[in-house]
Structure formats: structure tokens, C-alpha cells
Image (cartoon, rainbow, N blue to C red):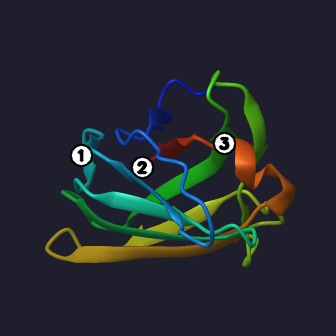
């Protein structure tokens, strides 16, 4: 694995609820030397196999890009069950999500939409997000 890639597990303990209640997982601040993903970055998973991502990202240098290389779905033992897949593949990679940051003076909203195998829903307890900038 590229040492520049940050692997962060959410800081939220997932609570499995019944019915159609989504699973929301958040992260603390994630920093690289030139880039920051602010506290509160959030993946929201739904039992129907859909997911959304919301975060705010910044850079101290112009023309940087925040890349989420893939997001693993984990069970209570930390076993990888599968990965989230983007609705908009980038360079043929359905697990990759990107947010360009043209200006170092701006904050950018990083939004993404994804899907996963809904049969995994009962076993998902957390996520591991692999990203770099």
C-alpha cells in the first residue's frame, strides 16, 4: 500500500437499529501535509444498498485533489465484507471518489454517492476509508 494513503476507521460505534434507519459513520479531522478533511466527514448507508458521503476539504496549495481510493465495509470482527462502489466511475475504477481543490483559499464540499451489496447490510458495523491528497 502506498504510504501516502491514509486509512481511517470511523470514530463512531455503529448502533444497529431495526427498520429503515440509516447507519451514519463519522470521522475526526484527517490531515495530510497540504490537505485537511474537516471533522464530521460522514458516510450514510441505507439498507437498500445506497450510500452518500459528505465532507468539507481544504488545501494549503492550489490544484490539489482529495482521493478516496476505496471504502471497505467491515463486520464486528473487522473482516472486510466488500466495498462501496461509486455511481460515477473515475478512470474505470468504481471504488474511487475524487474532489479537486483548485484554490488554496477556498473550502470545498466533497459529496459522493455509492452503492453496495444490500445483502451485507445486517453485518456492517463500520467502514474503513482509504484516502490521500
**Residue 58 position (above or below residue 89):** above
Which element is circle 3 on? strand
Report the side of 65 relative to 48 (left or right): left
Q: Mark 1 vs mark 3: which is more N-terminal?
A: 1
Rendered-image quadrant of the N terminus:
top right
- Separation of marks 1 and 3 at Cα, in angstroms: 19 Å
Tag 2–tag 1 contact (CB < 8 Å): no
Disc 3: which residue: 72
Counting other residues with Cα less than 10 Å from the Cα at mark 1, is it few (<14), some (14-19), or many (20 or more)? few
Counting other residues with Cα less than 10 Å from the Cα at mark 2, is it few (<14), some (14-19), or many (20 or more)? many
**Residue 63 position (above or below residue 60):** below
Residue drawn at x 30%, y 40% as measured from the top left: 32
**Residue 28 position (above or below residue 102):** above
Tag 3–tag 2 contact (CB < 8 Å): no
Tag 1–tag 3 contact (CB < 8 Å): no
Report the side of 116 relative to 27 (left or right): right
- Separation of marks 2 and 1 at Cα, in angstroms: 14 Å
Question: Which numbered circle lies on residue 66?
Answer: none
Residue 102 visible in rendering = no
Q: Where does residue 84 sit, x and y in percent of width and height?
A: 71, 57
Mark 3 or mark 2: which is in front? 3
Q: Where does residue 58 sit, x and y in percent of width and height?
A: 24, 63
Question: Which numbered circle lies on residue 133?
Answer: 2
Disc 1: which residue: 29
Q: Mark 2 vs mark 1: which is more N-terminal?
A: 1
Amino acid at each position: 500500500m502506498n504510504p501516502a494513503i491514509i486509512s481511517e476507521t470511523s470514530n463512531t460505534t455503529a448502533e444497529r437499529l431495526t427498520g429503515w434507519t440509516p447507519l451514519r459513520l463519522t470521522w475526526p479531522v484527517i490531515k495530510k501535509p497540504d490537505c485537511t478533511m474537516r471533522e464530521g466527514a460522514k458516510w450514510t448507508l441505507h439498507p437498500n444498498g445506497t450510500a452518500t458521503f459528505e465532507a468539507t476539504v481544504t488545501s494549503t496549495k492550489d490544484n490539489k485533489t482529495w482521493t478516496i481510493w476505496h471504502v471497505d465495509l467491515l463486520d464486528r470482527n473487522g473482516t472486510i465484507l466488500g466495498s462501496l462502489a461509486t455511481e460515477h466511475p473515475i478512470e474505470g475504477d468504481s471504488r474511487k471518489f475524487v474532489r479537486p481543490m483548485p484554490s488554496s483559499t477556498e473550502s470545498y464540499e466533497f459529496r459522493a454517492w455509492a452503492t453496495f451489496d444490500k445483502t451485507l447490510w445486517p453485518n456492517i458495523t463500520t467502514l474503513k476509508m482509504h484516502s490521500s491528497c
